[in-house]
Image (cartoon, rainbow, N blue to C red):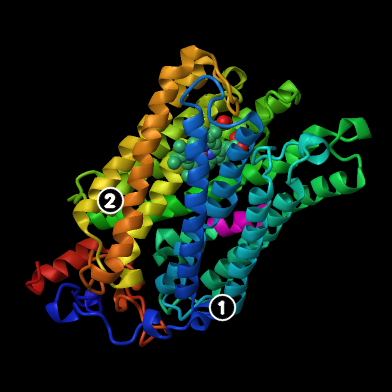
Amino acid sequence: MTAALDRPTSVSPESVSLPKRHYLNSGYTVRSWLFTTDHKRIALLYLVSITAFFVLGGIAATLVRLDLMTPQADLVRSETYNKLFTAHGVIMIFFFLVPSIPAVMGNFLVPLMLGARDLAFPRLNLLSWYVYMVGGVFTLYALLAGGVDTGWTFYAPYSSTYSNTYVMATAVGIFITGFSSILTGLNFIVTIHKMRAPGQVWFRLPLFIWSIYATSIIMVLGTPVLAITLVLVGLERLLGLGIFDPRLGGDPILFQHLFWFYSHPAVYIMILPSMGVVSEIIPCFCRKRPFGYEFIGFSSFAIAAFSFLVWGHHLFVSGQSIYAGLVFSMLSYLVAIPSAVKVFNWTATLHKGSISFDTPMLYALGFVGLFTMGGLTGLFVAALAVDVHVHDTYFIVAHFHYIMVGGAVMGYLGAIHFWWPKMTGRLYPEGWARLSAILIFVGFNLTFFPQYILGYLGMPRRYHIYPPEFQVLNVMSSAGASILGVGYLFPLTYLIWSLFYGKVASANPWRAAGLEWQTPSPPPTENFARTPVVRHEAYDYPAIDNQQVEEGLR
Ligand code: HEM
Ligand SMILES: [Cu+2]
């Protein structure tokens, strides 16, 4: 087993104490954090910021769900209701989900997984965080000063002409934050091309890197379109140009084309990184090479490419020609193919694996199930006739929450748990963590499954008042939301607890493959004492396990 000689032997007892020198104790001042160019510290800056936004978005969701407990408008006024779901959508999409895995886990892991010291442009990386924060503060100001009521989609001409809420300030905030996304994407692309350790050829890259690369392409190509769209809305508001408002000679459908040309691919900015995470976790917790490594990798690119061809499925009922509708419907089914390839490969990896159900694995399995549900109902809405029936109903709300919360957030939580020992050098309490994973899964389904039924029965989304016969399902959904909310509070609590009291983690507590596990937990500022050399395939779990058996460690 010479090939495996430079693998970490993780469970030897002397390795289980915090290293003397690591990136967390390289400086304690506020300055050492706010001016750091260490990708790992920047990842933590993002972690704290997006967590704060998640809490704010969650509070807005809670108020919406509370209000929908009764058919009449009992809690808030209609204007407030509109502002609440808009705040929820804007925060969750632009300030939580889009930056979640790329900016937190990507920042932390990309250099480590490549065996590099840092990202290609460390100062640009810090700038990205500042740009994100400036945009975030702008938007928060707008939301607190008076709010926006356009929905996160900013449909024109309502947003460009009629709404008298804080559209401009919110749009400026999102516009600014977009640059953060673009800079991060560029940084990742250059880093993945230029900074790989010797021997780290493309087909030995972790699948997480493939997915981050594909995500970065979408970030770089898609985000400018959103930025331009928001500028056009702004110009129409300020100068009365006739771009979108038909009264001024503009075309409101043009807005929808531009908006969804970004926002459909953006869904994959949210989901592809989670797919990458799951492709790391599943092989580790069933001790097998991923089935069809190349297929999982290339399907990320196929998804990224196809995602740019399907925006018109959001316009089926907007009066586009029936032929355009047909083409977009067919193209939408194309995206299902690479997605299904991934699900098939994960499932095949599980087959005859020796599976252990640790917390990251629970999240990964949750991801596969819930993403599949979201994806299958995506096929429903990609069918023209079905979409006419369920368009703008709660069916859509259920569908996208299954993808974005059941999929992307589960992947994010899986990632946080999987790499927490590496990030902090501490283990979290496994029992609590499993409990909360189960709570989140149950709460999630109770929240969003009834919404499929509500939508199918005809309850429109974004409505404040609904007919009494929909109340039972709405109450179920709100009850689920409170379970889900508690489920989310758990990790927030025990992860912070573990920072101080958690058991010290070894360099590689999961016996995982991948360069990031070959350096101490938490890693030193320069990541690796010596530049690692890659001599074997990715995910060589059989070899790792054989070696440990030979050394008498297992
Ligand atoms: C705690 C769990 C959550 C609950 C209970 C929840 C609930 C809701 C509700 C009730 C709506 C309003 C639907 C409507 O009136 O049309 C909504 C909309 C939305 N949610 Fe969530 N949500 C949750 C988590 C999330 C997360 C984590 C994300 C994304 C990361 C998200 C993204 C969205 C988006 C984009 C909208 C659309 C807003 C709009 O129509 O303008 N939600 N959610
Ligand atoms: Cu779409």
Amino acid type, label 2: Met
Taking depth in this image into account, of 55 and 281 the one nearest to the observer is: 55
Q: Give the range drawn in magenta.
A: 214-222
Dot 1: within a 10 Å radius of its alpha carbon, few (fewer than 14), some, or many (20 or more) residues? some
- What residue would you read off at disc 1? 122
Q: Quadrant of the C terminus?
A: bottom left
Q: In which quarter of the image is residue 482?
A: top left
Residue 61 in percent (x, y) is at 50, 39
Question: Observer-nearest residue: 403 or 78?
Answer: 78
- The residue lying toward the viewer, choosing from 52 and 517, is 52
The answer to whether residue 220 is magenta is yes
Circles 2, 1 touching at the beta carbon (< 8 Å): no
Relative to 137, 539 lies left or right: left
- Percent across and percent down for residue 5 are 22, 78
Circle 2 crowding by C-alpha within 10 Å: few under 14, some 14–19, many from 20? many
* Residue 291 screen position, x and y as percent: 32, 50
Q: Inspect the magenta stretch and tell me whether residue 22 lies in it.
A: no
| Most common secondary structure along the magenta stretch | helix
Residue 139 picture location, percent across and down: 66, 54
* Vertical position of residue 253 compared to residue 284: above or below: above
From the viewer's perspective, tell me whether residue 186 is left or right of residue 418.
Answer: right
Name the quadrant of the N terminus. bottom left
> Depth check: 196 or 456 in front?
456
Q: According to the image, label 2 marks what residue?
A: 361
